[in-house]
Amino acid sequence: GACGASAGPPRPGPHPEPGAVDPQPPGAAPRRRSWTAAARSAGRAAREAAAMEVHYVYQKVRSEFGKHCRFSDEPAQLLESVRPSDDFAEHYIVRNPSVAELDTSPLMSSHEANTERLVTRSSSMRHQEGGWPKDVDFTEQSDTNRFRKKAEKDEEYKNAVKALGPVIAACMRQNNTIDIYESYFEGDIADHSSEPPSAKGLAVFRDPSDIKRTATSINWYPEGPSKIAVSYSILNFQDSRFNNARMPVQSYIWDISNPNMPETELLPQSPLCCLRFNPKSTDTLVGGSYNGLISFFDLRKPGGTITSSTPTEASLIEKSHHDPVYDVFWISSKTGQHCASVSTDGQMLWWDTRRLSEPTEVLELENGPGGMVLGGSSMEYNSEAGPTKYLVGTEQGIVLSINMRNRKQANKGIQVLDSGPGKHHGPIYAIQRNPMYTKFFMTVGDWTARIWSDDLRTPIMTTKYHSSYLTRGCWSPTRAGVFFVTRMDGVVDIWDYFYRQNEVAYSHKVGDASLSSISVQGGAANQDHGGRLVAIGDVQGTVSLLEVCDSLTVPQSQEKQAISNMFDREQKQEKNLEAREKDLRRLRQAQEEAGNREAAEKKDGKDEKMEELLRQVDASFLAMIKEAEDDESKAGDGGSMEPSQAEDKY
């Protein structure tokens, strides 16, 4: 670009400007001076091949030296253009590349410090009787009575009793004055119908094993909401986890107030698929294993530790199920030691836990006499419905109603419910009777939950098809119209038929893993907490403890009657539909029989006409033959007559 300066005297200085000459005398004419600025733009190879210089001359008068420059925008000018040539390629040298990294950020180092973890454990102590001197055996009643009589005669004992008398009397008068346990609103029923349904998480119990297993079943402690028994197993056939290590066999009993560590560890021979407390003897449990064994646990066994327990009795492998035991129930008996189990091998076995060497009774689950054997996937037993009645859900989606009183009949006491449109499209994962009305029961399978009646072979009510596959389900022990179903997408749905029958009342997202088991705490002895605590297990071995709100727990006024009327109405409707179907079936059968008779009559009439026609044709043919024979005979007779006879004739 051009460089110019404004007019003005030159800038004084001790040194001349670069490129300037000596100053001229005053009055002399200005003299021009030029200088050259060379710009070398070719590469090293080009300069060695030919000395090529590009020159551009800048000129300005001497008087403009030292003046301030004024820059302005000028268009670009092409000074020189070097055309490509092959001569330059001979001198081209590839430079060895070098990579350098520069980083101005300071070097930092991260350090972590963690104190040693404090592991807490809850332990218990059983106190039987103490405070006796060493020389007194408290197990002998005679020794204790002798010591009591001796102590009562002691003067110090009498004085201590006299001193404690006024204190105890004052406490008794105080207790009689104020009843601290008085219930001020006893008998009043609170209305929670307006409360929106909700649930909140209380605790999470994780499988301590490194290999994550499925929480296959959950069972609450019968005497209160304090413990849960959880069985763990891997039910997937040929699962890849079997290849890495041997599958752990431990199952656990958890204290709901201590989710950090299980209270008791159960060590069966094979992983448990189901586990239940004995309602009559709460310190004993029975479990069904993955390899078909039945194991009996007694937590009071002498020599056992507080934290672990091995089976007291176990069945023999050759006398047990051949498939995993999917459900087991304690049944009503005089001793309280009998149970029943069901498996997908098509057998239902009865056991006496005092002697598990062989089952007391065996029943094949057949689809009718001599029919296909069905594999049992779930079972229900409720003594209130009948001590000999059982319900079995099969992996074929068919429900079996079993009454052992009729086991000597042709069907072995097995009644097969609807195996047509009413059955499930997949295995029945849960079956349970309604705790208020044991005549009605619920099954959970495929994408629906269905309600049945003992008097009908078809379901009376069916939920809508859920968006995800259903895995388990159970009734609420306190409300007749509330039941829970778990889904494969980690959501538990709560239905309230007293509120509405066509939509879910409340859905709660438990986790991302598929849910595998559910159990609601409840019982006649624990009505204060019944139906409020819900334990839900998933395929990762995690058991989540939820607490549902009062609107899903406390029974509402007139609820039982309304639910009973609803079930009866649906049952009557289904009976009417069955009767209508039978009438239509009879009508169709009668129409078919009438049509068959009419067709047979028409066919018989056509045959008679044909036979008559054939008879007429035969008669005509025979008549023609006879006439021909007569004519021939007459002709023969006429040719053989004598002349005298002929004359006489004419």
Image (cartoon, rainbow, N blue to C red):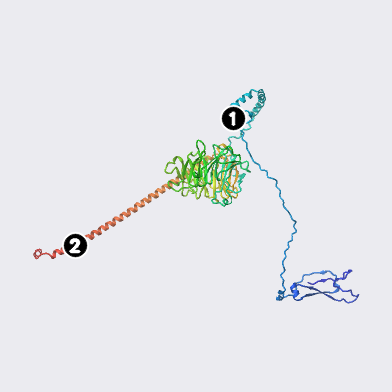
Task: Give the label, 1 or 2, closer to the camera.
Answer: 1
* Left or right of 376, for residue 538: right
Residue at horizontal 40 percent and vertical 50 percent from the top: 588
- Compared across the picture, whether 96 is left or right of 480 comes to right
Disc 2 is placed on an element classified as helix
Q: Is residue 79 visible?
A: no
Of residue 590 and residue 484, the one placed in the foreground of this image is 484
Residue 94, percent across and down? 71, 70
Residue 292: x, y in percent?
52, 45
Residue type (three-letter) at the residue carrying disc 2:
Glu
Find the residue positioned furthest to the right. Answer: 26
Which residue is disc 1 drawn over? 139
Task: Pinpoint residue 157: horizontal percent, then vertical percent.
Answer: 66, 24
Quarter of the image that includes the N terminus = bottom right
Type of the residue with mark 1: Thr
Residue 526: give x, y in percent of width and height: 57, 37
- How far apart are labels 1 and 2 at the CA level? 133 Å
**Label 2 CA crowd tier, 10 Å (few <14, some 14–19, many 20+):** few
Instruction: Identify the residue shown where x is 78% and y is 75%.
Output: 55
Q: Which mark sits nearer the N-terminus, 1 or 2?
A: 1
Residue at 32%, 55% (x, y): give it: 603
CB under 8 Å between discs 1 and 2: no
| Residue that numbered label 2 is attached to | 629
Residue 310 quadrant: top right
Question: With respect to residue 242, does 102 lie above or below?
Answer: below
Position of the C terminus, as image quadrant, is bottom left
